[in-house]
Amino acid sequence: MRTVAPDPKQTAIIAKWTALAGPIKNTVVGSHVEDILGDASGNRGIETPMGAVVADSILWGTAGPAKGNAQISFMNIGGVRSSLRLSPPTGTEGIGQITYQEAYNIAPFGNLLVTMDMTGDQIRQALEQQYQPVPARGSRPMLALAVSEGFSYTWDALAPQGSRVVAGSMKLNGVPLDMAATYRVGTLNFLADGGDLFTAFKLGTNRLGGPEELANLVEYFKNHPGLKAPVSRIDGL
C-alpha cells in the first residue's frame, strides 16, 4: 500500500510524456485475421504461434546479403511478452489491427538482432538446452525456443537429456541439416550471449549486429498485413 504522497514534479513529468506518447502508441502498424496466442504469461516450455511469429520477424530482419544472410532464426518463448488478440485491447483500434503499443508489449526489452555462423551440431546443442534439470533453471526446467518458417525437427521428451532432438529430424526447407555444415542463424543478443542457459549460441562465430527488436517487429508487421497463426513446426514439443 502506498504511504507516500505522489511527488508533484514527477507526476507532471509522467503526465507530459504520457500525453506525448499517446498518438505514437495508438498508431496502427499492422493487422492479423485471427488470434495469435502463446506468450511468457503461459507455458514457456512449449512451441507457440506467437513465438513463431516473432521468430519469423527475426528471420525477416536478418535474411538477405545486407542483413546477415540468416537461414534459421530462434526466439525464446519467455521473451515473447504478449499475444495478439482480435478484440482491441485498448478500444482505440479496430478488430485485428496491431498498434505500436501492442508491438511494444510483445518486445519491450530493447534487445538487438544478431546473425552468426553455427554448425548443424551447434544448432542441435542449442535445441537440447531447451531442457535443463532442476535446480539449473529452478521451477522451469523446460524453456522452449520458437523456430522460424522453413525449419523443423522432432523432439522426444522421453529420451535421455542431451539426445531429445531426434537424429536426422532437423530440416531446413525439407532438407536434413548437415551436422558439419555451417548455417547462418538469426536471434537476439540475449540468446547469442547465452541467456537462459542457452550457452550453445555462444559458440556462434562471425557475428553481425542488426536492428533493435521492437523496431524490427514493427517493420515486420507493416510488411506482413493479415497475419495468421503459424502452423506447428516442431513435432513433439
Image (cartoon, grey):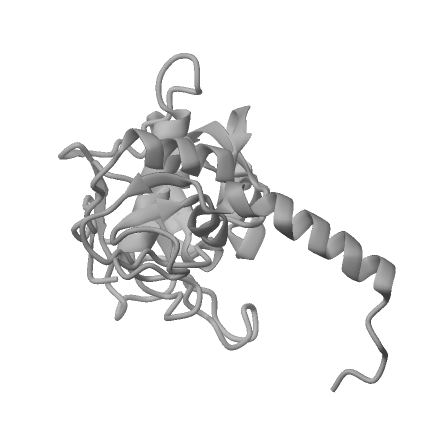
Coordinates of residue 111 in the picture (x, y in percent): 57, 41
157 left or right of 115 in image: left
Residue nearer the viewer, 26 or 36: 26
Residue nearer the viewer, 14 or 101: 14
Coordinates of residue 216 in the picture (x, y in percent): 45, 33
Coordinates of residue 83 in the picture (x, y in percent): 36, 58
Residue extending farthest left:
174
Quadrant of the image containing the N terminus: bottom right
Residue nearer the viewer, 47 or 22: 22
Quadrant of the image containing the C terminus: bottom left
Q: Report the label total.
A: 0
Residue extending farthest top:
65
Residue 73 shows up from this direction: no
Instruction: Say which residue appears at 47% left-offset and 28% top-offset.
Output: 115
Coordinates of residue 232 in the picture (x, y in percent): 18, 53
In the rendered view, tell whether residue 200 sits above or below residue 69. below
Instruction: Say which residue appears at 31% left-offset and 64% top-offset.
Output: 46
Quadrant housing residue 202:
top right
Residue 110 shows up from this direction: yes
Residue nearer the viewer, 227 or 111: 227
In the rendered view, tell whether residue 210 sits above or below residue 151. above
57 left or right of 26 in image: left
Instruction: Say which residue appears at 41% left-offset and 47% top-offset.
Output: 75
In the rendered view, tell whether residue 150 sits above or below residue 36. above
Instruction: Say which residue appears at 35% left-offset and 17% top-offset.
Output: 64
Quadrant housing residue 236:
bottom left
